[in-house]
Image (cartoon, coloured by chain):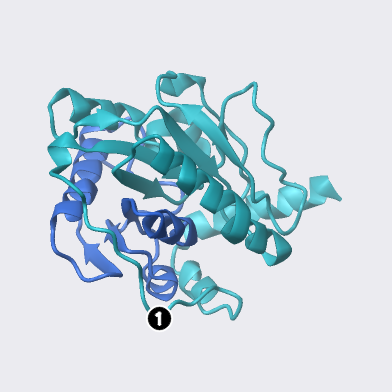
Amino acid sequence: MGLIQRIIEEEGIATVSVSLNLAITKKVKPPRSLYPGFGLGHPLGEAHNPELQLLVLRDALSLLELNLEPGSVVVRSYPRSG
Amino acid sequence: MSTLKKFKDRTLAKVYAKIPSLLDLYAQRADLVVNAAAPLTPLPRPLRTCCVALVTTAGLHLPQQEPFDMTDKHGDPSYREIPSSVGIEELAITHDYFAKADALADPNLVLPMEPLRQLAREGTIGSIAPRFFSFMGHILGEHLKTLLRTTAPKAAAALKGDGVDAVFLTPA
């Protein structure tokens, strides 16, 4: 996914992604990422948890308005119901 | 053969879901693309006026679209266009490389269509792009070249043509 993100960014579109693994993200180096600490298959956190999904999406998009260094990964933790 | 592959892939996906630290071992694989620097395009205008699109590698598609090819060990570098107006419950997933039960139960987990609509309603973003793009993850070998040289640039150009200012991407 990070490789696709880089290509979209190179096309002249600002991008931000969710990272599910810091080691992979640091190697592939997409332009901007949010690492929320969720597992594979769960980039927005939990199924049927619209509040958490909205929070993660809102936080990720907000990174677009920050003056981050290229390749930045922002680490945040989120409350989970389970 | 394809049945055996499917069983192996789905079993591995469950193992990765149970033991996330295994992903760190995967990250050490020599064939993972390593980049020294990242490109950066600044947001052209405030987010509240931007047109936003979603892109995922979770293998989502509409039921009437051709499913992704899960039999090729190098993956499937193609993508499916998903009109942003479809209902989230209309989406199917063809992807054996992650434990997808939760994403099948609520596709917003991997393609947050309803959260994005909420952000548009409240004015956090300006508008939603007319279409989203869905890929597979885990693309290897010759198919990786096709992804990087052909299909991903084609999707990026389509996003640009749609007037998209910002893209939110999700792996699976």
The residue that appears at 22% across and 36% down in the rendered structure is A54
Label 1: how many Cα within 10 Å (few below 14, some 14–19, many 20+):
few
When asked about the image quadrant of residue B141, the answer is: bottom right
| Residue found at the very far right of the displayed protein | B1
Label 1 sits on a secondary structure element that is loop
When asked about the image quadrant of residue A72, the answer is: bottom left
Q: Is residue A9 above or below residue A82?
A: below
What is the x, y in percent for residue B142?
72, 64
Q: How many marks?
A: 1
The residue that appears at 28% across and 43% down in the rendered structure is B165
Colour chosen for chain A: blue
Image position of A32 (left or right of B109): left
What is the x, y in percent for residue B78?
64, 45
Colour chosen for chain B: cyan
Q: Is residue B13 above or below residue B61?
A: below
Q: Chain of mark 1?
A: B
When asked about the image quadrant of residue A63, the answer is: bottom left
Image position of B18 (left or right of B139): left
The residue that appears at 74% across and 57% down in the rendered structure is B73
What is the x, y in percent for residue B157?
47, 46
Q: Which residue is mark 1?
A: B36
- What amino acid does circle 1 point to? Ala
User: Front-most of B45 and B169?
Assistant: B45
Q: Is residue B58 visible?
A: no
Q: Is residue B80 above or below residue B155?
A: above
The residue that appears at 42% across and 18% down in the rendered structure is B87
User: Front-most of B95 and B20?
Assistant: B95
What is the x, y in percent for residue B108?
38, 33
Q: Is residue A33 visible?
A: yes
